[in-house]
Image (tube, rainbow, N blue to C red):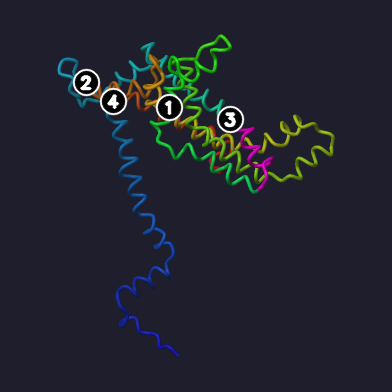
C-alpha cells in the first residue's frame, strides 16, 4: 500500500494541484482569466476609446484633436447627405452580398450534403474551404484582373455582344460574394447533413412535390443556419474597405470614409466607425431571435 503524504509534507505544486482538483470553479476561473483579460482590455477597451473619441472635435486650423465633449460629429454624420448615402449604400451592399451568398450556397450545400456520394463529401467540403487558404489580397486582385477591361469577363461576354461589369458597385458585390461564400455554405451544409432523410420521404409519401417539400420542410429547418451564415457575410461585408478600394472604382463605403478621415479628422473617423458597430449589434440581436447564434 502507498502511504498518503500529510499535507505539511507535500510540495507546493502538489498542494496547488490538490486545491484546483477540489475546486473546479477556481480551476475554470484561472483558465479563463487570460482570454477574458484580453477581451476586456484590448477589444472592449479599444471600442470604448473609439466611442469616446467620436465625441471629440478637431481644430479646423491646426487639425489637432480637441478633447472636448461634443455631438457635432454625429450631427454632421446624420445631416450630411453624402454620409447618409454612404451609410445606406454600405448596408445595402452587405445585404446584397448576404442574399447572393444564401441563394448560391443552398444548391451547393444541398449537393455536397445530400446528393454527392458519401466518400466524396469530405473532399467537396475541403474544396469549398480551399479559397479561404489563399491570401485575401491575392483573391481580390485576381478579381480585378477578371473584371478589368480586356480581362476574362470581357473575353467571355464578347461573343454575346456584351462587356464585363468593369469596376464599381456591381464588381464590389461580386467580389465580396466570392470572398465570403464559404462562410454561408458551411453552416447550411452542416444543417442539411443533420436533417433526417425520413422527413423528406414522409413529405413525398403524403403527396408533396419537391418544391412544397423544400418550402414546408427543408427551408424552415435551415433558417437558423442561413441566419448564422448571414452573421459572417453581413458583418464582414459591412466592415470591408480593401475590396472597394481595389475593384470599386469611385464607389465609397463606410470603411473608405473611415480610412480617409483617420489622418485628417480622427474624431469623425471614430464617429463613422461606430456606425457599423451599432448596425452589426442590431443585426445580431435580430438574428438571435431566429436561433442563429446557437448554430454558430
Does the residue at mark 1 contact the one at mark 2 (Cβ under 8 Å)?
A: no
Cβ atoms at labels 4 and 1 below 8 Å apart: no
Q: Earlier in the sequence, mark 3 or mark 4?
A: 4
Q: Nearer the viewer, mark 3 or mark 4?
A: 3
* Residue topped by disc 1: 142
Q: Which residue is mark 4?
A: 55
Q: Which residues are magenta?
A: 102-118
Q: Quadrant of residue 42?
A: top left
Q: Which image quadrant: the N terminus?
A: bottom left
Query: Label 1 neighbourhood size at 10 Å, few (<14), some (14-19), many (20+)?
Result: few
Residue at image position (48%, 25%) is 94
Camera-side mark, 3 or 1: 1
The residue at which mark 3 appears reads as 102
Q: Closer to the observer: label 4 or label 1? A: 1
Q: Earlier in the sequence, mark 3 or mark 1?
A: 3
Q: Residue 54's spot in the image, x, y percent?
A: 30, 26
What's the residue at 66%, 38% (across, down)?
221
Closer to the camera, 288 or 115?
Answer: 115
Give the structural element (helix, strand or loop) at label 3.
helix
Q: Which residue is mark 2?
A: 58
Q: Earlier in the sequence, mark 3 or mark 2?
A: 2
Q: Are marks 3 and 1 in contact (CB under 8 Å)?
A: no
**Residue farthest bottom in this picture:** 1
Q: Quadrant of residue 190?
A: top right
Disc 3 to disc 1, C-alpha distance = 23 Å
Alpha carbon separation for disc pair 3 and 4? 38 Å
The 10 Å Cα crowd at callout 3, few under 14, some 14 to 19, many 20 or more, is many
Percent across and percent down for residue 112 are 63, 40
Instruction: Left or right? Give the position of 245 relative to 281.
Output: left
Look at the magenta stretch and give its main secondary structure.
helix
Amino acid at each position: 500500500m502507498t502511504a498518503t503524504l500529510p499535507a505539511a509534507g507535500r510540495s507546493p505544486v502538489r498542494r496547488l494541484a490538490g486545491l484546483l482538483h477540489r475546486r473546479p470553479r477556481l480551476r475554470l476561473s484561472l483558465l479563463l482569466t487570460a482570454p477574458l483579460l484580453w477581451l476586456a482590455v484590448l477589444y472592449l477597451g479599444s471600442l470604448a476609446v473609439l466611442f469616446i473619441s467620436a465625441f471629440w472635435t478637431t481644430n479646423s486650423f491646426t487639425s489637432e484633436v480637441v478633447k472636448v465633449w461634443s455631438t457635432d460629429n454625429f450631427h454632421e454624420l446624420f445631416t450630411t447627405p453624402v454620409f447618409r448615402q454612404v451609410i445606406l449604400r454600405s448596408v445595402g451592399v452587405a445585404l446584397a452580398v448576404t442574399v447572393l451568398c444564401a441563394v448560391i450556397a443552398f444548391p451547393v450545400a444541398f449537393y455536397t450534403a445530400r446528393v454527392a456520394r458519401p466518400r466524396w463529401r469530405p473532399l467537396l467540403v475541403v474544396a469549398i474551404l480551399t479559397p479561404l487558404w489563399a491570401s485575401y489580397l491575392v483573391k481580390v486582385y485576381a478579381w480585378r484582373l477578371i473584371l478589368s477591361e480586356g480581362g476574362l469577363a470581357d473575353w467571355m461576354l464578347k461573343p454575346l455582344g456584351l462587356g464585363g461589369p468593369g469596376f464599381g458597385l456591381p464588381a464590389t458585390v461580386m467580389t465580396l460574394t466570392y470572398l465570403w461564400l464559404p462562410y454561408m455554405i458551411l453552416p447550411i451544409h452542416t444543417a442539411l447533413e443533420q436533417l433526417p432523410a425520413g422527413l423528406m420521404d414522409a413529405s413525398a409519401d403524403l403527396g408533396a412535390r419537391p418544391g412544397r417539400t423544400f418550402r414546408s420542410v427543408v427551408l424552415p429547418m435551415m433558417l437558423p443556419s442561413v441566419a448564422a451564415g448571414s452573421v459572417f457575410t453581413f458583418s464582414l461585408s459591412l466592415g470591408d474597405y480593401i475590396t472597394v478600394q481595389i475593384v470599386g472604382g469611385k464607389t465609397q463605403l463606410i470603411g473608405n470614409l473611415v480610412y480617409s478621415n483617420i489622418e485628417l479628422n480622427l474624431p469623425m473617423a471614430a464617429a463613422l466607425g461606430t456606425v457599423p458597430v451599432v448596425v452589426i449589434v442590431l443585426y445580431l440581436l435580430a438574428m438571435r431571435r431566429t436561433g442563429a447564434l446557437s448554430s454558430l
